[in-house]
Image (cartoon, grey):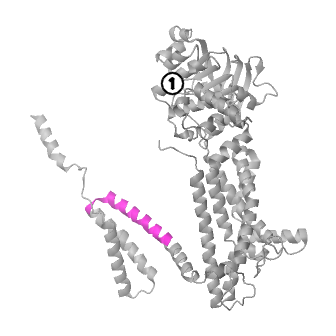
Amino acid sequence: MTNTAVDATASAARPASPRLATRRLPRWTPAAVAGGSIVVAVAIGAGADLHSHIQWGLIALLLFVGGSYAITARVEGRRQAKDRVATSLIWSAFILAVLPLYSLIETTIKQGAGVINGTFLTHSMKNVLTIEPGGGIYHAIIGTIEQVAIAAAIATPIGILTAVYLVEYGRGWLAKVVTFFVDVMTGIPSIVAGLFILSLWFILLDKAPQSGFAGSLALAILMTPIVVRSTEEMLKLVPNELREASFALGVPKWRTITKVVVPTAIGGITTGVMLALARIAGESAPVALLIYGAQYINNNPFKGPQESLPYYIYQQYVDGNPASYARAWGAALVLIAFVMILNLVARLIARWKAPQHSGR
Amino acid sequence: MAKRIDVSGLSAYYGSHKAIDDISMTVEPGSVTAFIGPSGCGKSTFLRTLNRMHEVTPGGRVEGKVMLDDENLYGSGVDPVTVRRTVGMVFQRPNPFPTMSIYDNVAAGLRLNGIRRKGELDTIVEKSLKGANLWNEVKDRLNKPGSGLSGGQQQRLCIARAIAVEPEVLLMDEPCSALDPISTLAIEDLIGELKERFTIVIVTHNMQQAARVSERTAFFNLAAVGQPGKLIEIDDTERIFANPSVQATEDYISGRFG
């Protein structure tokens, strides 16, 4: 008898225990809540006469997060509600991060696309009055490419060899010191790198540098620590088993490094170098100090003033008239495109060079 | 070809920690010797001292003598790189070089040691892959990445890579522990064939495997966690499994402890 009583209570309690399927909100709910909160926020903003559209956006954001929590908590439960809030916060953060980037690219394209044409890309500013339209950025493109290439030719081997030392050989105090100074170098302001090369020139040659090469040296100082850091991380990712496999075949350490370790990491190393290139391609401060910004084409980076894209943008902006503003935007667009292409190339190389894995 | 290994008074350290203590044993040429024992008793460490791989680990240090026929591996003026060409090794987890094709993986040891003539390489690669019972499975895709093979094939690829440099001793550190029974059988058959050309030392946790493949078995144990591992006994495999002379060996083999 007692058994049946227990069974009875158990079966009575069973329907109350949580079921596997619970009430769900339809899939379009987040979009609907987002739309609703934007409408309400616009109404509040217009009604309260708030001028700043950023305030409108913030109100919409708060409404969206609060609204989705309230609705989900009512229908689906508190755990799901928290999940929704976390998801909405991450999406909002993503939009907040992308908006300025989007706005920047949009503005640059809107302002700069108009001036870009064949003449702009193939002519210098020689014999062009700054208040007139016309002229171009050919000399700046040449300068940027040469300076960045020389900087890369200096910084890449130094950076990769340093990273190889740190990962494969570095033990004890010397490795610690090198790591410390690489960290310090990462934080050097670019203008300081420029000043360093400037003073080096005065100390060694007793004159101002006035060449693209001097700018390259400053850029190399900025690039080296980035290359070291990224290469180091990539080399650390190479499994130790591969090194041991190679040692066990009687392969000397240096061949293990050049034939096994570095090839395994080469995709990541190349990406790192390309990203470092993209970073220094936009530097203007050291360039302003060292290369002097010529208005004409100078193909020789070792002699005479050169131009570079970032510095060209600055000069045109300082000239301060509609024609030069337009040229500055155009040059900015070209610079952004240049950096983006470098990034894309880096990704392609990384994908192409990555160790082949089967679908197993 | 195959050489005798004669170890006397060998101790290995990781920094200040002594991992194995005063081991002496003889490994007969052209035979298979199995090392068994609980985890952490120093079997793998001892194996790695036999081709000077132990000192690759930071802080790794060895005392004692390992005679390969009449040469001490730890004698002065001995180059660890040369030692490793003579004493090859196969690891627990298959580790083919991920950037290289099947062909290049097998040729790696030769090429990295300076043999470059295409014809000679072709011959050795084919011979090694045949020696590792892998040739028929991969002969049509030698230029595909080695990482595309199954686990058992990868391990046989690693064995082919190890025997391609023609070592005289082959060390195997639990070569089947990551493999299924069929691949394990393939590797065990292979060990049986290889022992005619090489002296083979194999570490295994699988007692049946030790009984199946080896002529001699060494039992390692440690007194307590943190104590160095010791060689308890080494004898003919049949004797170790049927009638060991030390009680601890019998307890371990029959699954009784303490």
Residue A12: say if magenta: no
> Would you call the spot at circle 1 few (<14 residues within 10 Å), some (14-19), or many (20 or more)?
some
- Which portion, as a residue range, is magenta? A75-98
Left or right, A311 with respect to B95, comes to right
Q: Quadrant of residue B145?
A: top right
Residue at the image position 85 percent from the left and 75 percent from the top = A208
At x 58% / y 13%, what residue is drawn? B215
**Residue B35 appears in the rendering:** no
Image quarter of the N terminus of chain A? top left
Name the foreground residue: B28 vs A167: B28
Percent across and percent down for residue B255 are 46, 18
Which x, y percent locates residue A159? 72, 55
> Which is more toward the observer, A171 or A341?
A341
In the image, is A12 to the left or to the right of A130? left
In the picture of the structure, the residue carrying the numbered disc 1 is B186
The amino acid at mark 1 is Ala
* Viewer-proximal residue among A228 and A245: A245
| Location of residue A298 by image quarter | bottom right
Q: Per the image, is A92 magenta?
A: yes
Q: Which element is circle 1 on?
A: helix
Most frequent secondary structure within the magenta stretch:
helix
Depicted B91 relative to depicted A152: above or below: above
Where is residue B208? Give x, y as percent: 49, 18
- Mark 1 belongs to chain: B
Q: Give the residue at x 50% y 43%.
A: A358
Report x, y in % for residue B190. 55, 22
